[in-house]
Each structure stands twice: as C-alpha cells, then as structure tokens.
Amino acid sequence: MNERRKPYPFDRLEPKWQTVWDETRAFHAPNPGEENFDSKKPKYYVLDMFPYPSGAGLHVGHPEGYTATDIIARYKRLKGFNVLHPMGWDAFGLPAEQYAIKTGQHPAVTTRDNVAKFKAQLKRIGFSYDWERELNTTDPAYYKWTQWIFLRIYNSWFNPETKKAEPISTYRGEDPDSVRLAYVAEVPVNWCPELGTVLANEEVIDGKSEVGGFPVVRRPMRQWMLRITAFADRLLDGLDALDWPLSLKALQRNWIGRSEGAEIEFPVVGSSRCDDRTPQHGVPTSIRVFTTRPDTLYGATYMVLAPENPLVDELATEDHRRAVADYRAQVAAKSDLERTDLAKEKTGVFTGAFALNPANDERIPIWIADYVLMGYGTGAIMGVPAHDARDLEFARKFDLSVVPVVQAPGKTPEESVGYVNDGIAINSPLLNGLVREAATAKIIDWLEEKGHGRRDVRYKLRDWLFSRQRYWGEPFPIVWRDGKHEALSEMELPLEPPPLEDFKPTGTGEPPLAKAKDWIRYSENATRETNTMPQWAGSCWYYLRFCDPTNDRRFVGEEPERYWMGGSNDEARMTNAEKMTKPESSGTSSFDIRHSSFPAKPGGIDLYIGGVEHAVLHLLYARFWHKVLFDLGQVSKPEPFQRLVNQGMILGEDNRKMSKRWGNVIDPLDVIEIYGADAFRCYEMFMGPLEQMKPWSMKGVEGVSRFLARVWRLMMTENQAGEWDLSAAVQDVEPTKAQQKITHATVKKVTEDIESLSFNTAISQMMIFVNAFTKTEVVPISAMRTFLVVLNPFAPHITSELWERLNSTGNITDQTWPAYDEKLLVEDEVEIIVQVNGKVRDRMKISLDATEEEVTVAAFANFRVQQFIVHKKVQRVVFVPNRLVNVVVK
RNA sequence: GCCGAUGUGGCGAAAUGGCAGACGCAACGGACUUAAAAUCCGUUGGGCUUAAACGGCCCGUGCCGGUUCGAGUCCGGCCAUCGGCACCA
C-alpha cells in the first residue's frame, strides 16, 4: 500500500474490471451478419480524432474529448444502441522521421513503442473502445487502401455539367491528364536550403522552418496536387445541414473564401487587339483581372500585375526593363513574412506599358507591385483607388489619378474618395444613378455582350499540395514512363516503401526514396514516383475503415459502411412519421438501419469530438475525399461527420498552455496513481463545459475523488480487519417519497445533461444525490442500483464493483438506462415567489396548480406584500402559474 | 482591418426572461481524536442597520443605453481578453 491511504480501493478494483471487460469482449461491436449482432437495436457511431502517437505520451488534454465520447458510448449502450466506438493511430508523419534521423532508429520501431505507450495509457483510463477494430495508418494492410483511394481520385475528374466526380473514362476531351482530380503541376513550395528539404505550410512559422528556425524560400517544384477547388461550392453548401459549431463552419467558409464578381479583359495598348498603335511583336493582347466590384470599372485608373506574373516579361518596355527586373529580384528575395507585412509601405514600378479601360477607352498605366498576389484571381488587378483602400494608398504614393465613381450617402463626389461600401454610381456613363447591385448587373451584362468579360466566382481555397519529400509516408502508387505518369494496378497494392537505412533529406529537393535505386526501378523504362503522401492522407478516411477494419477485399465493406455510416439511398423516401426507424430496404440487406439522429441528415457519424486545430485542414480534406467516394458510389452518405464538437484546451495549473517549456505538463497516469481512473475521468468532465478552455487543478481532482469515496462509503463499511463489507444501512426497502423524488430528478437531469454533453452539471446533480443520501440511516438498495447505472458511464469501475457487491444480477454494463417518471418529480405544494415591482419580497407554499385568483388573494394577504404596497396604488398583478406572482404598484 | 468566441464570488463554475452564485475548490469555525490526517456538521458576494443574534434594507453578472411587471439571459452601442484569417482585388 502507498504511503497515502486510498479513500477506497480503486487500485485493486480498476485493473480488475479492465481485465473483465477485455476478457468478456464487453465492448466489441459486431457487424451486421456477425455473431451476436442484434439487428433490432439502433446504431450509434461515436468517434474521437485519433492521436499521433508521440514519444511523450498523452497529457491530460488528450483524454478530455476521449472521456466525453466514452461517456456517450457507454450511455448509448445502456440505452440499447449498437455502439461503434473505435480507436487507432495516425502514425505516419514528421516527428517519427526526425527522431529516426537523429537516432538512426527506424520510424516503424519508434511508432510501435509509442503506440504501445499510448494504448497502455488509454486502457488504464478505462475507455470502452472496441480494441478489435484498432487500426494504424502505417500498417500496409491499411495504407494499401489509402493508396487505392488515391488511385480512385487519380482516375476521376470533376464533370462541371453534373458537378460530380466521375471516372476519367467519361471524359471526352483531348487530354485526360489535364482534368484528373490528382494531377502534377509545377508549383511554388516552401524550400528550406539549410534543411535541404521542402516544408509543408504548417511547418513554416513566420517565414522560418519550425525545426531549426532556418529561412524558407519559395521555389517552384513538380508536385502532386488534388483538385479540391472543384468541390469548393459543395464543401461550402454541405456545411448547412451539419450539426457543427457555427464558429467552426465560419472558419471553413472563410477558408474556402468564395467571392462573386467578374473577370474583365483589358486590351493592351500596342497589341494586335488594340489599333491605336502599330502592333508590336510579343506584346500580349490583353490582361484579365478578377474583381468583386465591376460596378467601379469606370474608376479603374491603372492596372497592377503581380511581380511573378509571366506577362510582365512581354509587357515591360525597353526603357523600363531594368527597373522591372530589379524590382522583381527584390521581391523574390523577400520572405513571405516580409511580403505580407501590412504595416509596410506599398512598393511597385511602372512597366512602361498601357492598357485601355474597356468601359471608357482611357489609356491607363500598367504597374507591377507586390501587393498583388500571383496565387489569387488572375495575378492582376484593376486599380480603383477611389474605392479600395489598398489601391488608394498605392495611387497616392505614385501619384496616379483618382476618379470617384461611387457616391457615398450624404457626401460630395470628392468626399466619396476612399468610400468602399454601397452607394450611387457617378462618373460612369452606363451606370450613373444606379445602386451597387443594379450597376453590377448592368456592367456585367454589358461586358458579356461586348465580349470584354463575364460573371465569375473565385475562391481563396487552393488545390491541395499532396506530395511530400519524405520517407515516413505512403508511397504514391504511380510510375513514370517517358515523362508521363501512370497508375499502378490495384493488384500491386500495397506499395511498401523501401527499407531505407538513411532517411535524411537528399539536399537537392529530391525525396529520400530516390536513394533506393532498386526500388525506384519499376521496369526497363519506368521508374516509381518517389514522393510520399502527407500525414493528412491516412486520416482522410480512417473513420470508414473502422466500420470494417479487417476487410481485405474492399477499403470498407458495403454493408458495414451502410450500417455504421447510416445509409442514404432510401433517405429521401423517409417521412417524419418513420422518424427513428428505417423501413426494411430492398431485402438484400441483413439489417434495418435505425437512426439515432434525425434521419434526413447528410452525415454518417453521429458524434465526432476533437480539437479545433483541425477545423480547416483535416475536416476539409476528409469531407473532400468523402465527397469523391460518394460521387463514385463507394460510400452512402455525402458527408462524413454529422455532429461535431470541439473540446476546449486544458491549461496547466498556472493558466498557461501545457508544455515542457513551462514544466506544467500533467501525465494522466500520475493522477490515476493517486486518485484512480474514475476520479480522473469525472474530474475531466467536472472542470467545466466541454468546449471551454480551462485550467487543471489537482485540488479539483481531490474534490471529485472525495465524491466517489462518499459513493463508496454510502454502500460499504470498513471492518476491523480493514476490509470493506457491504454496509448494514443498505436495505431492501421502499425508498421514501423524498428519496424517490431525488432519484428520479437525478435520472432526469443526468439523462438530459448527457444528451447535451453538459457533463459538469450531470456530475453536480449526482453529488447532490449522494449528499442527500449520506444523511439517511437506511439506504434503499433499489435507489442505489438506479444511481449506479447513471453514474456508470462517468465512473465505470467503481460502479461495476458496487453493482457486484450489491449482489445485483448480471453486469452493470448490460443494464438498461433507467427511465424517470415526471409524476414523481412534482409535489403537492409548490413554492411561489412573491414579488412587488419585480423584487422578491417573500415566498409562499401553495397547492400545485392554484388558480390566479387563489394566488393573488394569498399574495395580498401576505404581510410582507402589505408592507410594500401600503399607501400605493396597485396597477396590475402578473401571475405565472406555479412560479410567481408580481404585484405592480405605483 | 475582417470573422468568431468569451467576460458572473478568492478560484473552477450554475442559472426554460422569473429566488444570481447550484455543485466543487479554497478559507474560517465546530464535532471526533492524546494529537494530526481522514471523516462529519456549519459559515462564506459587498455594504448598511443592530451591543450581539434574529430580522431587515440597499448594491451587485465588463461598461453605457433600450425593451419588459421583471434582464446574467433579449435588442443597440462601447471596452477588454482569447482564437482564426489577413494586401484574397
């Protein structure tokens, strides 16, 4: 025994029950058609964001969401659901590779050790995962299917007519490679010369490498891209029907960044399109720009191209060539940070060339400036200084003309310079007098008619840079022959990486896999792709694999997918009357899908809990893959995650973010050693609302631990020998009316609070329950049994043990969640609040459902009321049945 | 700058428009004990009134206004903190 006396023997009973659960496969969820599958039960899929198993192990922040989902999973099982509650490992990625470079230990070895450590920690907390479904993204049996899905994406294109992904075979154009959803492009990447490698955006912080702090520059390289932008609108629209936090939807919408406007063509002076001068060789005919304000076209007094825009070479005139080249070199040397620093002054140079404003045929100068980005729109803008803050700053600095074309309400045209909101068009012959909306519509019609432009939509979202120059990731199932890429056949999957000894970056930007000369050589005239996939790949579909983790013929079996992800094809036929239960489908199916959530929802997973840090990357990428698979008929729902909740971060006791740096990291196992897993779980939930950020407090754990000890002593007493026996106070008697009331009130409150994920208040209510019973001499066993079941999802070990000690039948995990009877909650008499002018002056006991008249009479007879209304005129009496009466006097 | 979230005791927090601070922590007092720990019981937002107690009164949910018989809660405007995006045309 520890120096410290345990308040109750959790150190013995917790491992005992964990073993029992393992041995009896208590939380194994059979699939449809498997042994013990009960098709009459509804399904519930509750998922955690699976962790990256780092060397440091879990800290107390990780299990917060895991505890919440575990409570839900255990609750839903008691409620009679088939619950899918799995766990796995997102184990490809940088840290393991970095560690390998440092120590020479193979990433597979570190991964195995780290997984073992994480799993031991999770098991000690007593989570009810179905460990038979455990998966690992680095397992060839898993990434075989990651590669398989990649091939599906590679072999698909986005048909703009149907707005769907379709097999590439339906594409009728010349060059299928130009439309594939996975394609190769030369794109600027984050190249870190010091590390000799390319970095992902998230590995670059303030223009420097996260590892080592070395400078990072932009450099074009051949990369694999996924055409996520084709799905921008569907990713945007799909958000509406999801039960996600509004703030999270806002983050995704913001990230996708849809802007409506027009693409407008400006003819270049001196080109063949423009007859005011003799055509010059090499000068482009026109420059296209994107604008959200086509209504301000008459105010476009200059143009700006991004310095990197390839048109610049041809546009720059002889006498400006030098200045342009200097400026471009200057910009290229800048880091991303310097370039996007808002505080800095606008810079730019004139190219010497001119364009014509298509609206009024004015000659306007063409500049280059780094405030225009190559990566957005067309890499060129029309400068409308009068109605855009950035353009105005630029125009003032370089003395360009400013023409107001929108009049602000109540202002003169001159005063309207700098006004960026809606107003009335002026100085715009075609548009004068129109409000913004009408002006926009009219100018676009005019542009389309004249062939100068068209309506257009642009997105901030870029295609997904999908290749990494890394060792520890999924190899691409692609070979190169005569400079062209082609897919491996599915028969050749999984494609395993070569067993490299040296994972170090090559220094040239070539991936480490290039070092495996034998592996690369695919055939006489074909070589393997040497890039690997990013860490996000494995997490894009792991929730599907959990439905059917050992299937070796498909990435997920059709039937398990339809069952756990909830089916969709007959969704449309469902009526409200059918609500929770789905009708028998075609008959080929061995199960009914009974829904836990309202059936017409697009998402398959009933509840997904994880950190907000995945708001835009993982959650967007996974939705994208899911939509491709949905279009290709591989999955049954258009969205993966119906209800999503972000748990808040847990801070250290010092209110700072937990980190090694502050020395405030808390290991769950240290807490469990002292207070036990049940106390740990309950404290995690008692701290405050799940979504909120909140600091850890060991004193708080102690308080919750005291609560559990009181639960224990409510039913157990310690004998002379120091052993715990069933307390004599626990008797098979009818609970009193008051006891019955608090029992039912507790069941009601806990049920409702679990449904709304308000675990902290559920625990408060259970504390109130225990406090009430601590004072009684006879403890009715029936009330205790009921209580143990509602406490079970929170504190599964102690409740299992007490259930057994009370000589109850069966295991507590097989019980049915208790119902509550509203009738038992109401009393014959209610307390009514008596107010005068909205201030509480007294309370009165009065019979339930007393009429307004009865209550009013009683109120006026009340001594305290009389004190306050004497010499005053009663104006009205407000009556709320069973609640309050308010006498308003003057 | 834009978008979003949050502001309630000494602390973590509760509160369908109807008793602000449930529950827990900390603190203080008491019981038990030779003593301590543990446990149990009680007090605990601020001010005023009172010899004290009881009782009573006033104020109090970031700030200012509004709606309402009644506002922590609804509406408008500010301020502060945190998070995301950021020259996105």
Image (cartoon, helix red, strand yellow):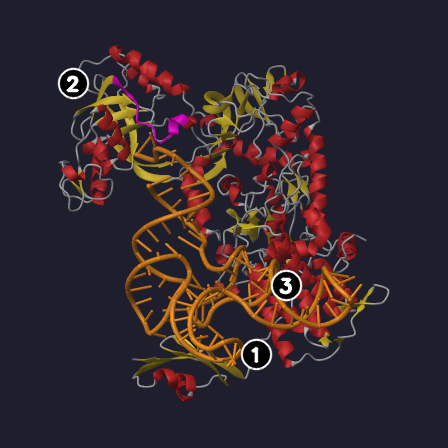
Q: Are marks 3 and 2 on the same chain?
A: yes
- The mark total stands at 3
Residue A54 location (% of width, % of height): 65, 37
Numbered circle sitting on residue A276 = 2
Front tag of 3 and 2: 3
Tell me the CA gap for discs 1 and 3. Answer: 22 Å
Q: Are marks 1 and 3 on the same chain?
A: yes
Compared across the picture, whether B23 is left or right of A255 comes to right
Q: Mark 1 and mark 2 in contact? Answer it, CB < 8 Å.
A: no
Front tag of 1 and 3: 1
Asked if A570 appears above or below A746 in the picture, the reply is above
Question: Is residue A367 on the magenta stretch?
Answer: no
Say whether disc 3 or disc 2 marks the residue closer to the N-terminus: 3
Q: Amino acid at mark 3?
A: Lys
Among all residues in the image, which is located at the extreme right?
A: A721
Residue A237 location (% of width, % of height): 42, 46
Q: Between A877 and A806, which is closer to the camera in this rendering?
A: A877
Residue count near mark 1 (Cα–Cα under 10 Å), binned few <14, some 14–19, many ≥20: few
- Quadrant for residue A709, please give it: bottom right
Question: Which type of secondary structure does the marked residue at label 3 adopt?
Answer: loop
Compared across the picture, whether A148 is left or right of B85 comes to right
Residue visible at 41% across and 89% down in the picture: A861
Q: Amino acid at mark 2?
A: Asp
- Quadrant for residue A41, please give it: bottom right
Q: Chain of mark 2?
A: A
For residue A70, say whether it is visible: no
Residue count near mark 3 (Cα–Cα under 10 Å), binned few <14, some 14–19, many ≥20: some
Q: Between A688 and A363, which is closer to the camera in this rendering?
A: A688
Q: Amino acid at mark 1?
A: Lys
Asked if A878 appears above or below A281 in the picture, the reply is below
Circle 1 residue: A823
Q: Are marks 1 and 2 on the same chain?
A: yes
